[in-house]
């Protein structure tokens, strides 16, 4: 008897955005919201079991225009303030752990502002199998969640490590 093979894991080479504005221009939606709870469901994304989180949308921020020569941003996602959505925390891949440094959507990450809100940069994609719908997920594992600036908008720069 042979044991089943583990699912294939894709090693994704994630884009690194120079500024939060560049990342937001590339996102399908930029939200200020509160992570409410870990959802009961997980999703297989790039061969890695990834956590889904429930997020209450406080505000949908306007996406900045992409920098010249960058091309078209992804289509805008249909999200409205007051809605509760499920967001998959995009995995890092290749490490055997979805988030070796901690899940950025986990409220324990310390990324929330004093009022408990975070900025979430979203994409939408399909899952591992044709017809699977992963739904909303972070644009990258590293630059998909930010602490809002004092006025609730995008900060001008990434936080220092």
Image: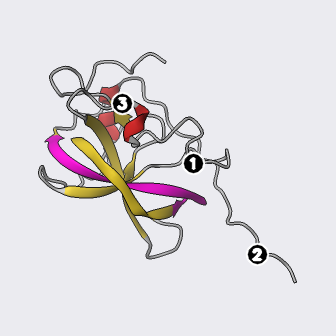
Q: Secondary structure at mark 2?
A: loop
User: Residue 98: which disc?
Assistant: 1
Quick one: label 3 or label 1, which is nearer the N terminus?
A: 1
Residue 135 visible within the image: yes
Rendered position, 85 above or below 35: below
Nearer the observer: mark 3 or 2; the answer is 3
User: Residue 4: which disc?
Assistant: 2
As for residue 45 lying within the magenta part, the answer is yes
Q: Secondary structure at mark 3?
A: loop
- Determine which quarter of the picture holds residue 154: top left
- Determine which quarter of the picture holds residue 105: top left
Q: Which secondary structure dominates the residues rendered in magenta? A: strand
Q: Secondary structure at mark 1?
A: loop
Is 104 displayed left or right of 31 in the figure?
right
Magenta stretch: give its range: 44-60
Name the residue: 15% across, 43% down.
58
Rendered position, 153 above or below 98: above
Name the residue: 19% across, 20% down.
150
Q: How many marks?
A: 3
Circle 3 crowding by C-alpha within 10 Å: few under 14, some 14–19, many from 20: some
Name the residue: 45% across, 42% down.
140
Q: Position of residue 123 (x, y in %)?
A: 35, 51
Q: Position of residue 75 (x, y in %)?
A: 27, 53
Q: Position of residue 3 (x, y in %)?
A: 81, 76
Is 33 displayed left or right of 27 in the figure?
left
Name the residue: 23% across, 26% down.
114
Circle 1 crowding by C-alpha within 10 Å: few under 14, some 14–19, many from 20: many
């Amino acid at each position: 008897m042979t044991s089943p093979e583990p699912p294939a894991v894709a090693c994704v080479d994630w884009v690194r955005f120079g500024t939060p504005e560049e990342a937001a221009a590339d996102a399908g939606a930029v939200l200020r919201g509160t992570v409410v709870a870990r959802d009961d469901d997980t999703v297989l994304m790039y061969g890695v079991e990834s956590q889904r989180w429930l997020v209450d949308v406080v505000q949908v921020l306007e996406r900045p225009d992409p920098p010249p020569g960058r091309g078209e941003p992804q289509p805008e996602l249909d999200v409205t303030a007051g809605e509760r959505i499920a967001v998959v925390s995009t995995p890092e891949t290749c490490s055997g752990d979805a988030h070796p440094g901690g899940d950025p959507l986990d409220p324990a990450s310390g990324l929330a502002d004093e009022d408990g809100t975070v900025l979430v940069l979203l994409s939408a994609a399909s899952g591992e199998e044709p017809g699977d719908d992963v739904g909303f997920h972070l644009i990258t594992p590293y630059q998909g969640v930010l602490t809002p600036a004092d006025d609730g908008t995008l900060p001008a720069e990434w936080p220092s490590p």
